[in-house]
Image (cartoon, grey):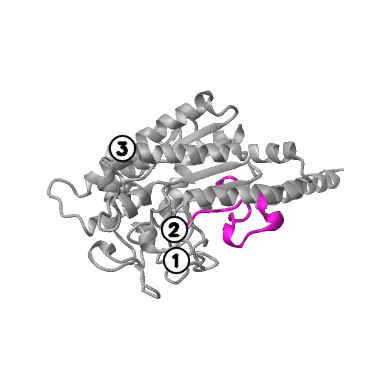
Amino acid sequence: MKGFSEFTFLSAVLVFLWLCAKACSQPQQLQVPCFFIFGDSLVDNGNNNRILTLARANYRPYGIDFPQGATGRFTNGRTYVDALAQLLGFPNYIPPYERTRGPALIRGVNYASGASGIRDETGTNLGDHTSMNRQVANFASTVQEMRRFFRGNNNSLNSHLSKCIFYSGMGSNDYLNNYFMPDFYSSSSDFTVQAYAAALLQDYSRQLTQLYTLGARKVIVTAVGQIGCIPYQLARYHGNSSRCNEKINTAVSLFNTGLRKLVDIFNGGQLPGAKFVYLDSYQSTSDLYLNASNYGFEVIDKGCCGVGRNNGQITCLPLQQPCQDRQKHLFWDAFHPTEVANIYFAKTSYSSQTKSYAYPINIQQLAML
């Protein structure tokens, strides 16, 4: 009996270890069935690769730390939404709309386009792009195509879409590649900063409402970050009182304040059944600047690659040798964060316990609704 007991115990231990190993090897459970992404170069993953534009990143050193190499992501590795998709349990990254059709659409698509904005003319100084209006139109085409996979049953399709996460990050280029580029655009003479923010919010409200009409119910919208502090601006700004261009930061703060109020309006009954989450990218980037060393960042004022002052006058050149210590850099190039910064922002917004980063709930809570 003693031998039998030892054998039984050993067998139980081996079964336990096998189950543990199996559980540990399992990917994180999928929390939502699909993920749709709208935005600009901060989250673009290849939609600009085949169009005539300077806003492209399908060449080295972009993607130097990404398994698939230079895919069109404007960073060295994963973007914010890549990291967020992993946190949500997706086994694969959400593919770009430019090369996604058929059943793959059901899991979600990335419509983001470098240089794009809320306004159609934004970013035209860099060439072609897919503006927010066109991204919404592309999603409408996707919904039309998805009906086939639900056999024309609109109730089933709407039920599916209501469980998906929708992410929209827009507004940065409406300032960087529009309002604060007076040699190319007339918007700064046509609008005061207050009137411009109001005009952007009016257009954005219409676009987000269109997404709701098409089936979006769980929606994340992001504030514009502290773009007065990116290497591109630091290379051009020569102020005495501040390291950053506070004129730009003040302008985007007006837009951000209005966007948070818009989220309250949407959640207050204007769009029944919808839940919007506001990510305060301005606050999270500001806090990261102030406490950079606590998170392992040693260089916060220049890109890992680029040309000129702060590596911010010209973005990364083809085959340029980037910095070696990319884990210590906040910025990859003149405009965009490094992979490690993107991962930090994704984790912060996903499970934030403070409403100063994610309001009124965090992304993990949104997924569970």
Q: Residues within 10 Å of mark 2 (few under 14, many from 20)?
A: many
Residue under label 3: 195
Residue 86 visible in the shown view: no
Q: Residue at x 68, y 48 (%)?
A: 144
Residue 40, position in %: x, y? Answer: 44, 53
Question: Looking at the rendering, which quadrant does residue 2 occupy?
Answer: top right
Q: Residues within 10 Å of mark 3 (few under 14, many from 20)?
A: some
Mark 1 near mark 3, Cβ–Cβ under 8 Å?
Answer: no
Q: CA distance from mark 2 to mark 3?
A: 25 Å
When the figure is inspected, residue 65 is found, relative to residue 186, above or below; the finding is below
Q: Position of residue 317 (x, y in %)?
A: 36, 72
What type is the residue that disc 3 sits on?
Answer: Ala
Given contact means CB atoms under 8 Å apart, are the residues at marks 2 and 3 in contact? no
Label 1: few (<14), some (14–19) or many (≥20) C-alpha neighbours in 10 Å? many
Q: CA distance from mark 2 to mark 1?
A: 9 Å
Q: Amino acid at mark 2?
A: Gly
- The residue that label 2 is drawn on is 114
Magenta residues (range): 85-114
State if disc 1 and disc 2 touch (CB < 8 Å). Answer: yes
Q: Residue at coordinates 25% horizontally, 58% vertically from top-left?
A: 183
| Residue 85 falls left or right of residue 160 | left
Find numbered disc 2 in the image and state the secondary structure of the residue it sits on.
Answer: loop
Image coordinates of residue 177 in percent, x first then y, are: 34, 55
- In the rendered image, the vertical position of residue 38 relative to residue 124, given as above or below: above
**Which SS class for mark 3?**
helix
